[in-house]
Image (cartoon, rainbow, N blue to C red):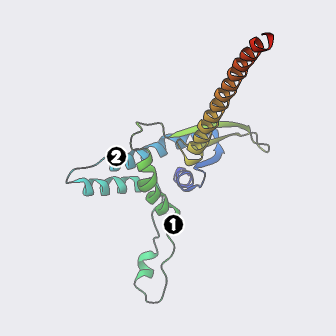
Amino acid sequence: MLRNLATSLINSRDERIVTTLPKAKELRPFVERAITLSRQAQGLSNEDSKARALHLRRQAAGFFHAGNVAATSLGGKRGQARPERTAGVAALKRLFGELGERYKDRPGGYTRIFKLGHREGDRAELAIIELVDNPREIEAHETEKKRAKATTAKKKASKKAKTETKGDDEVAEPSASE
C-alpha cells in the first residue's frame, strides 16, 4: 500500500494526493527516505560516484514496485513491442532526475500534510500530502512578489504625485495673493 501511495505521490502532476490522515502520516517518512537517497546521489562527486549512485538508485527502487517483470520474456521476440514502463520505474526516474536536483540543498522535510476534514460516507479523516517547493507553490510565490512590487510602485507614484500637487498649490497660492 505504501509503495502505491509513494508512486502516486511522486508521479502525480500536482505533486499531491488526497488520502486518509493515518495513511498520509505513514507515507511521510517512507517517501522522505526515498528522496533522501536521491539527494545523496546528487551530492556525489568523487571517482566512485557512479557505483555509489547506482547503489543508492537500487536502494530507492525498493520503495517502489519493480519494473516490468514480463519485459525480459518479450524482449527476445522480434516484432513485438516492449511494454510501457511501469509507474514505479517512472517514479524512480523522476525521483533521481527532477526531485533529487530540487531537494539537493534541503536538509529534510520534503512533504507537508494538510487536514481536510471527514469523508462523507465513513467519517474517515482525510488529508492532502504534498511535496514542498513544488512548481505551483513557487509560481504562486513569484506572483505574490510581483504583486507586492507593483503595489509598492503604485504607492510611491501616488505619494510623489501628492507631493508635487502640494508643491504646486503652495507656489500658486502666494502668487495669487500678490
Instruction: Give whichever of discs 2 and 1 has the lower sequence position.
Output: 2
Foreground of the two, 19 or 98? 98
- Specify whether 99 is left or right of 145: left
Q: Which mark is residue 40?
A: 2
- Pinpoint residue 71: horizontal percent, then vertical percent: 45, 75
Q: Residue at x 41, y 54 (%)?
A: 96
Q: Which residue is mark 1?
A: 86
Q: Residue pushed farthest front?
A: 178
- Pinpoint residue 105: horizontal percent, then vertical percent: 39, 40
Q: Residues within 10 Å of mark 2 (few under 14, many from 20)?
A: some
- Specify whether 5 is left or right of 77: right
- Pinpoint residue 35: horizontal percent, then vertical percent: 43, 46
Q: Residues within 10 Å of mark 1 (few under 14, many from 20)?
A: few
Quarter of the image for residue 23 reads top right
Foreground of the two, 34 or 120? 34
Quadrant (top left/top right/bottom left/bottom right) for the C terminus? top right
Provide the secondary structure element on which disc 1 rests.
loop
Foreground of the two, 62 or 52? 52
Structural distance between the alpha carbons of marks 2 and 1: 24 Å
- Pinpoint residue 63: horizontal percent, then vertical percent: 45, 52
- Specify whether 78 is left or right of 119: left
- Indicate the amino acid at tag 2: Gln
Q: Residue pushed farthest left?
A: 47
Eye-nearest disc, 2 or 1: 2
